[in-house]
Image: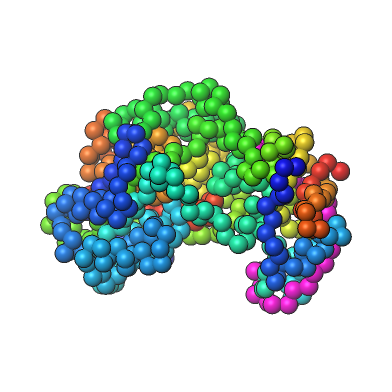
Amino acid sequence: MNSNIRGAAAVVGVADEVSPSGVIDVPLRELEARVITSALSDAGLALSDVDGLCTCTGGTLMHSVELAEYLGITPRFTDATQTGGASYGLYLEHAAAAIAAGLAETVVIVYASTPRASRKRGEKGLGVFATPERLEWETPFGVMLPISAYALAANRHMAAYGTTAEQLAQIAVDTRSWATRNPRAHLRDPITVDDVLGSGFLAEPVHKLECCLVTDGAAAVVVTSAERARDLARPPAYVLGAASAASHAMITQMPDLTITPGAMSGPAAFEGAGVTPSQIDVVQLYDSFTITVLLALEDLGFCKKGEGGPFVADGVLAPGGDLPGQTTGGGLAYTHPGAFGAFLLVEATRQLRGDCGERQVANAQTALAHGTGGVLSATSTVILGTEATL
Amino acid sequence: MSETFPVPAPSAVSAPFWAATEKHQLMMQRCESCHRLVWYPRALCPRCGEFSLRWEQLSGRGVVYAVSVHHRAAHPAFADRVPYSVVLVDLEEGVRMMSNVFGTPPAVGDAVSLGWVALDDGRNLPIFEAP
């Protein structure tokens, strides 16, 4: 498996930028540069220390190389793999492996996107779902992507396992409960299950309050070798295990709508880390929609397949619950600029450092971040731990 | 209907599928090596990697695998059909495709059979309805 990366690298610097209004009207490159230098400063490092760069947004051909030029760095390791919201956990996996293999020493992972500011300027979206196959075999049937795909998965899970609308809504309620403790969250008013169920539909059975935000934002993570990490400014969050997987691009091709590639990346990450789900103190699960969280909980082994509904029904993910989850307020209430994956890594690290103030999970020693990209298409699972877990 | 459904021109590999819709026939490829049906149309079998695929006509009978009732038109062609159902249908020959059911939404497990919506270029779009 991938146990050879256990403890070889650590997250040593993090930063993210969000806005109370949801709008950050700054050119993309400038926003990337800002959040990268903030994360390096957090680590006590400088751009001159960076020899690896991972990024895939911007819509151009060689984004990692273009950004490196803009920053004035000459990386010997770059990765611009695009697996949607799973890209950033995948980058951390690849960065840890590259560091373990001596291919890089200090790697920056960055994400920035300003869909709200772009919309205000009247710019059209990129049509990221408009592949030739989708245009021919899904678009003619009036799909709205990504929501239609997640709605089909939620419908199938409800029909197959008896999962209820109330159970799925509880995920949105618990996530919002975390957001009330985060002064930087976009939506901070508490909500109830009835609020969620009364919020209406674009595509049943996904209620509007079960859908992620569209906000501007940026996040960056600095990874370096464990050896170097020990000399830096902040307590390292060691990479204990990391794995990625992809099972399909279009929802039509997903083999079973209740099983995501998290059923591959999750067990691989746990095996590499040498821990079990019961040993995880806090989780950051990509919450594009509530069903994304429910499927992740099952596929990662926090509960059995089909039992996600009863598992979340009593607030297990909420503040004070047994499995605190999405402690920023998640993509549902904190920020969601198109891909939330990098923010999961930032928050997992902050929880392990004890930096989270009112939303801090007491004595968090292990944190899991799980990104989901596309239409449940690709996943990355990362398990981080404090020095005590090595 | 105010505007025709958003269906692109056939590709080289999908041309037989669309040509058959002009005669209200649902055609898919079957792998001559592993004998599995292949959906969507491709150059090779995604199960076994063989390039020998042969077109055959399907029954058009199936069962709803998943359904999502849509309350906003994703395209102007759907404006007078809202709410409409996006469905994944498991065809009885053992392959799954996306389609629509208009009118009363079906439930998972419901039997459905093939229907057609005319496009303005002579082709037809395969939809499903209660048998």
For residue A353, above or below residue A319:
below
Asked whether the viewer can see residue A368, the reply is no
Q: Residue at x 67, y 52 (%)?
A: B6
Residue A328 x %, y %: 34, 37
> Is A288 on the left or on the right of B128, as rendered?
left
The secondary structure that most of the magenta stretch takes on is strand
Closest to the observer: B39 or A349?
B39
Q: Which sits in the foreground, B81 or A87?
A: B81
Q: Quadrant of the N terminus of chain B?
A: top right
Tell me where residue A190 sits by quadrant: top left
Is B38 on the left-hand or right-hand side of A124? right
Q: Quadrant of residue B13?
A: bottom right
Which residues are the magenta region? B46-70
User: How is the protein colored in the picture?
Assistant: rainbow
The residue shown at (25%, 69%) is A75
Residue B130, horizontal then vertical, whole percent: 83, 41
For residue A289, above or below residue A165: below
Q: Relative to residue A310, is residue B34 depicted above or below?
A: below
- Count of labels in the image: 0
Could you tell me if residue A290 is visible in this image? yes
> Which residue is rendered at x = 23% and y = 39% of the image?
A354
Left or right position of A314 against A355: right
Q: Residue at x 72, y 38 (%)?
A: B81
Name the foreground residue: A24 vs A267.
A24
Where residue A59 appears, x then y in whole percent? 42, 59
The quadrant of the picture occupied by the C terminus of chain B is: top right
The one nearer the camera, A386 or A61, is A61
A177 horizontally vs B1: left or right: left
- Is residue A358 rendered magenta in the image? no
Q: Position of residue A160 (x, y in %)?
A: 66, 41
